[in-house]
Amino acid sequence: MGWGSCAVAWGAPVSDSAQYEVPERPSQPLAASDVSPNARMPLHQALPVQPGRVEAPAASSYPSRSGGEQGGDLPAPTLPESGAMVVPPPPVVPQAPAVSPVMPYGSPEATVDTSTITRTLTFRDLGVLGPMTLRGFSPLQGFDIPLPSDEVVTRAQVVLDGALSPSLLPEASSLTLTLNEQYIGTVQVDPKNSRFGPLVFDIDPIFFTRLSHLNFLFAGEYRRDCNDLHNGVLWARVSDLSKIIITTSKLPPVRRLSRLPNPFFEKYMRNTVRVPFVFPHYNGQTDLKAAGIVASWFGKLADFRGTSFPVTQTIPAQGNAIEVGENLPIDSNGNMPSGPMLFEVPNPNDQWGTVLVVTGRNKSEVETAARVLAFSSDTLGDVPSRLVNDVSLAPRRPYDAPAFVPTDRAVRLGELIAATDLQRQGGAPIGIQVPFQIPPDLFRWRQHGFPLDLHIRTPAAEAFEHEGARVDVLVNNAYIQSFPLFADSMWDKITKKVPQQHAGALALAASVPPWLLFGGRNQLDFSFNVLPIDRGACRRVNDAFIAEVDANSTLDFRNTYHYARLPDLSYFAGSAFPFSKMADYSQTVVVLPPQPDMETATAFLDLMGFLGASTKYPTVGIEVASSADLSGVLDTKDIIILSSLDQLGAAKQLLSRSAYEVDGASVRLGQKNFLDGLWYLFQDQDGAGQNNNAKPLLTTPIVKASLLIGGESPLAHHKSVVAILADQSAQLKEMVASLRDKQALPAVQGDLVIKNGAVLTNYRNAHSYSVGDLPLWLRVEMLLERHMVLLGLLGLLGVGMVTVGTAKWLRNRARSRLQRRLAKEDDPIEP
């Protein structure tokens, strides 16, 4: 989850936000309902705590808000001796102007001032997947807080909720908060109540950067002399429902092409990238390819975050937008472009918004401007407008997408992530993660593993226990193998000291099983498990552990073939396969209605964003065709159909080789001949447990639902068709959104997926076909593996033929011996 799912984030209504505490007095807990289920303390009532329960940070001054109101310094709270902190009533202060949140793009109510924004973010929204547990041997944890580059923080609070072990010594134990190494506050131990919060700490806005890091440092002791850092009583827990409340002010817009992709894309943000597209002269499919190139560029940048591209004909009431079209005015005088052109102008409805215009004198020039934006945005210069020339792109080769790991050579782990990310330091256990993507059609003979050549460096062996010290290798959370970290053999000790590329590193050889890999995103995990040497009571040891995987370690996907059995929609959802075989999608055509409405155009741009994210390359080679005229659909290309059912038209013919027929507002499992009927009747579940029990001639009505259908192209064998259909155009983008939904992905498989609301149902009923090439001997072996009875019959037939042939040869041999006449055989025998 990211910024887009917080209480007030990029357009949530103000009623969803917790009220911001105006820091004119010592920080006080928010209302229980505003913080977490753990909170039970009403605001402005006595709060029973022990003395020293909360240590507030030093006072700070906040910048003035609108209207010239100044925020005063925040005095540190004083705690009464009685052990109960009584919250004073709020003082009478001048009424501050209401903070205006960002309203949704295009909202009719979007007439409020957007210069000041308040966001309430839970830790979960910021990427914390669960409660953070800190222990004696792992006392430091934290997470990043990103901010837009065009905003500056004016006020901030952290609302903390969690627990501390009741067995800790109060005078020697605490939980300290820091932001970018700057002190914020400390939570101290209450032996009578392990739970704390909600506690409010003010953060000085000057501490924030574009990417800030909030850290929690745990210090704990349970006895006054010596403490075992691995003792179970040393723990602190911070709830992932704790909150950060941040108020920011907009900076004056800087409209320069050199800042692209800002302000439309923020590198450090975690929310879905939402960029409205404007077509002032919208007319069918005219400018959709150019807009699709731009959308796929944003998809490449956004990667896992996802994208959303709502389409309108008018400039949105708020925020940023991209305007695409032919002969769009380049100035207030109405002058037209003299060639492919990119320029930025203010949003006429919002002084803080920016509109990027992609235009030209004709359709070809608009596409040229889109290509330059996608491939050469860093060369446009520090100017607001630019007349551009087309870029020269080298032809792409199959499977050379930047997103995929190379399969023609061994790939260095340093190519997959930065070398600094291959090193970790802290208390064990330590984990290092290496993400990578592969084409889903990699085929390995006999399922042999892919070689993983590792070189690992760890601290001096004298400081840590040898027994049990190991590194565990996992892929996609599945265990592969463990290796000891400290080798005691004489040969290993000698080789580690010999000068070489991997000097001082421990060499390990592992193998990644093909059946544990997904078609698309995968992750290697290296988990280091070590313990410092126990030197006895009250003797401190250095337990800081450093683990490094050498950047020159390699993962080898060579000696593989490209082969897959389709239809399998999980390949499409995972990595847009088989269309992603070409990084620029030059072997793909998208079939749209002749006059797609705004909802269909939105789904098309969202799909382009998904395709760009799948290959990390813009969709410059894709073709767009009309469902009313399929003459432009070449038989050498794979096909994607995107349409509502009532506008499908002649594109129904493209589904003739699938197992399904679309009839009006229903989908039917088609029986085209007698053999098909027998095949549907006697089929059962496949090896993956797929739902195969659809009955012949079953008719399913489609009402406010969407379909994803896979099949073989009727225009050519071994070519694919994927259809995204819905009874209403608005449902199309819902199915496209499911392709990037991690929760929905496991349900996208088979050859038919039906989405009703949030429920996805899948089926597999089509005859399979193959894509890719295999040697003849491998095809024969695979055929025999699938038909064991046939293999047995062929074996018996072979034995019989060998037996008969051998017997016949022996009989002929014996006959020839009997008939052969020896020399002097008829001479008389001498006495």
Image (cartoon, grey):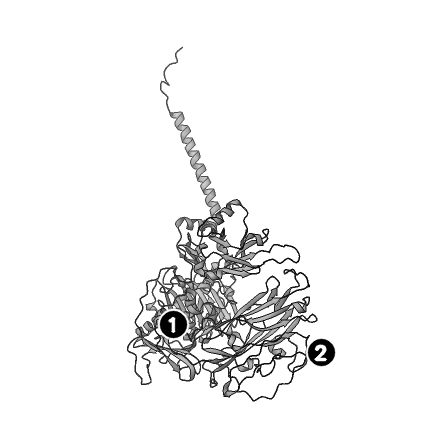
Identified by mark 2, the residue type is: Ser
Rendered position, 528 above or below 116: above
Q: Residues within 10 Å of mark 1 (few under 14, many from 20)?
A: many
Mark nearer the N terminus (2 vs 1) = 2
| Residue 98 or residue 571, whichever sits in front | 98
Identified by mark 1, the residue type is: Val
Quarter residue 299 falls in? bottom left
Q: Residue at coordinates 56% horizontally, 88% vertically from top-left?
A: 95
* Quarter of the rendering occupied by the C terminus: top left
Q: Is residue 129 left or right of residue 716?
A: right
Q: Residues within 10 Å of mark 2 (few under 14, many from 20)?
A: few
Q: Residue at coordinates 54% horizontally, 81% vertically from top-left?
A: 61
Q: Give the residue at mark 2.
A: 82
Residue 809 in percent (x, y) is at 41, 33
Q: Residue at coordinates 33% horizontally, 83% vertically from top-left?
A: 331
Residue 186 in percent (x, y) is at 61, 72
Quarter residue 222 falls in? bottom right
- Looking at the rendered image, the disc whose residue lies closer to the viewer, 2 or 1, is 2
| Residue 571 or residue 513, whichever sits in front | 513
| Residue that sits furthest to the left in the current view | 338
As drawn, the label of residue 294 is 1
